[in-house]
Structure formats: structure tokens, C-alpha cells
Image: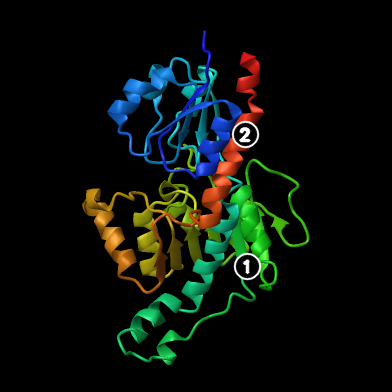
Amino acid sequence: MIKTIKVLIIDRVHPLLIEGLMQDGFEVDYFPDINRSDLLHKIGAYQGLVVRTKTEIDEEILNKASTLRFVGRAGAGLDNIDVDVAAAKGIDVFNAGEANADAVGEQTIGMMLSLFANINKADAEVRKSVWDRQGNEGIELNGNTIGIIGFGNTGSKVAEKLIGFDVEVLAYDKYRQHFGNVNVKESSLNEIFEKSNIITLHVPLTAETHEMVNSAFIEKFKKPFWLFNMCRGMVVNYNDLMNAMITGKVLGAGLDVLANEKLNTMNEEELKWFNYFTGSSRTVLTPHTAGWTEQSFYKISAVLLKKIRQLNLIQSMS
């Protein structure tokens, strides 16, 4: 019989989570630098597992996790966890997507403003003693039609933060209905294709959304548009995006995520689009940091602590 609920944390988290679990009576082991081999060796002794993104919690690991009761994802996406295998084994899987939604929402707006006002380009030029006002003439966000694809925690925060910019906001979510309000119009994809000239993506990575944004998707837009991807890199076919930027169908892109974020492992085709994006003044690029702020680091642990407590694992042993 299990006498103590043991939780293994294998990525960096705020001390709030560790201290809160220990105060509740959990036994916590914190190994943020653990490798896969050691994880496979240790996981059988634990009832809880907390992860971020660096480790794939796949069938091999879950088969070794003979007493596991839950997997908590310290972030939004669950694409590095085999949720089907976990469900079949009766393992609860949950994330903290609501905790970093503000951060992602703010960066989405920030990338739009940076790209439209040529802030990154102008800053780099001034640092080289180039004072080019005409060449850095910007465009205003005001008056544009923004299509939000995916209206969960982050998509809804983007819409909320766009209030005051005098833009029309359309939103599509295949799995949500009746979410429209005075500030955002619930729309079909076809309406977004027809009216939008700015698109921001906030969908999970699934078999359905894998390379959802490809050449066929892009060609459905009636107007040239700007694309912002704050969710998962593999939602976009980046070779097709590069080609659309070359032809002018896509005017520019703000990318916080890439299809391959291990830059030193890129193949020839990946290097082609990567070099194009890094060499373009019509892109703004960040290293998957949209949801990574001082505040979200704390909030993620607070949300996970609350959700673990709601499982009532300690009480069930009493």
C-alpha cells in the first residue's frame, strides 16, 4: 500500500509549487536536469509527475510509471504527453494554460506593433549609425481586421488586449460556440479568409492542426495578410510560409515558435526557411518565450498547485 504520495518534478518550476506540495504532505523530488534514462529508472516510484516541454512523456515512460496518478504540464500545450495512453491507464493529465495567457497575449500585440512600426529594423539601423526615417515608415494597427484562430485561454486574452486599438476582431474556434461579444465577432474560417488581413494562431498541436497553415490554407485568403504564430511551430508549414512571403501573399510574420527549435539539428530544407526568416526585415522572431515571464512563472506553479490539490490524493489516503 502507498503510504506517501510522491511527486517527481523534472523541469524548472517556481518554489511555490514545491513548498505548497510539501506543506500538504506530499513527498517531492525536484530533478530539473534529469535525463531520460534516469527518468525511466525512477518513474515507477512516483504517483505524480510535473513536466514542461523538454521531455516526451510517451508510451515507454508511461508503461514504466506503474503507480502514476497524474501528470501536470507546467505550461499550456500537451503535445509532449501521450494523453491517449495516459487516459487508458487512468492517469489524470492537466496543464496550466490559463497561467501564461496574459503573457502570450501581450507578446502577440507587441510583435504586431514591432513589425508594423519597423521597431526591430529601425533599432538595428540606428545602432549602426543609420538614420533612415523614410525607409522605416510604419503602418498603423488601427483599422485592420484581425482573425484569431483558436479562442481558448490565449486567443481570448489577445482579443481582450486589442480593445482600444480600433480594430475589427474576428475569432474562430472549432470546439467553442457562443463566445462572441461586443469586442469580438464569432466567425467561420471562411469569414476570416474573406475579411482578415492579420492572422494570429492560438491552437494546440494535434493531428488535425499539424501544418494546418500550408499553401492551400494561405491561398484561401482574399487579401494579403500578416501572420503571427504564438502556439506551436508545427502548426505552420514554414517552407510554404516562406514561399508566400516571397510572392507577397503573406506580408510579414511574427514567430515565437518554429517547427524545429533545436537549431543545430536543422536539415537543409529547414535551414533554407530559417535563413530566409532571419534575413528578412518583415519578420520578428523570439525563442518560444511568449508565455515566459516573471509573473507567468509564478502563476503556472500556483495553477498546478491548485489543480493537484483538487485531486484530493492526500485525503483519499486518510
Q: Is residue 66 visible?
A: yes
**In which quadrant of the rendered view does residue 147 lie?**
bottom right
Q: Nearer the viewer, residue 98 or 195?
A: 98
Q: Nearer the viewer, residue 130 or 185?
A: 130
Residue ID at (42%, 43%): 12
User: Which quarter of the rendered picture does the C terminus lie within?
Assistant: top right
Q: Earlier in the sequence, mark 2 or mark 1?
A: 1
Residue furthest to the left in view is 268
Within 10 Å of the Cα at label 1, are there few (<14), some (14-19), or many (20+) other Cα atoms?
some
Residue ID at (64%, 56%): 157
The chosen color scheme is rainbow
Residue identifier under label 1: 145
273 displayed left or right of 213: left
Is 24 drawn above or below residue 304 in the view shown?
above
Within 10 Å of the Cα at label 2, are there few (<14), some (14-19), or many (20+) other Cα atoms?
some
Q: Nearer the viewer, residue 61 or 133?
A: 61
Please state the horizontal and vertical placement of residue 225, each as a whole percent of the image: 51, 67
Please state the horizontal and vertical placement of residue 24, each as a whole percent of the image: 60, 29
Residue ID at (39%, 78%): 121
Please state the horizontal and vertical placement of residue 242, each as a whole percent of the image: 36, 62
At label 1, which amino acid type do we have? Thr
Instruction: Please identify, in this view, whether the residue under mark 2 or under mark 1 is nearer the observer.
Output: 2
Q: Secondary structure at mark 1?
A: strand
Residue identifier under label 2: 307
At label 2, which amino acid type do we have? Lys
Please state the horizontal and vertical placement of residue 219, each as a whole percent of the image: 48, 59
Q: Secondary structure at mark 2?
A: helix
**In which quadrant of the rendered view does residue 31 lie?**
top left
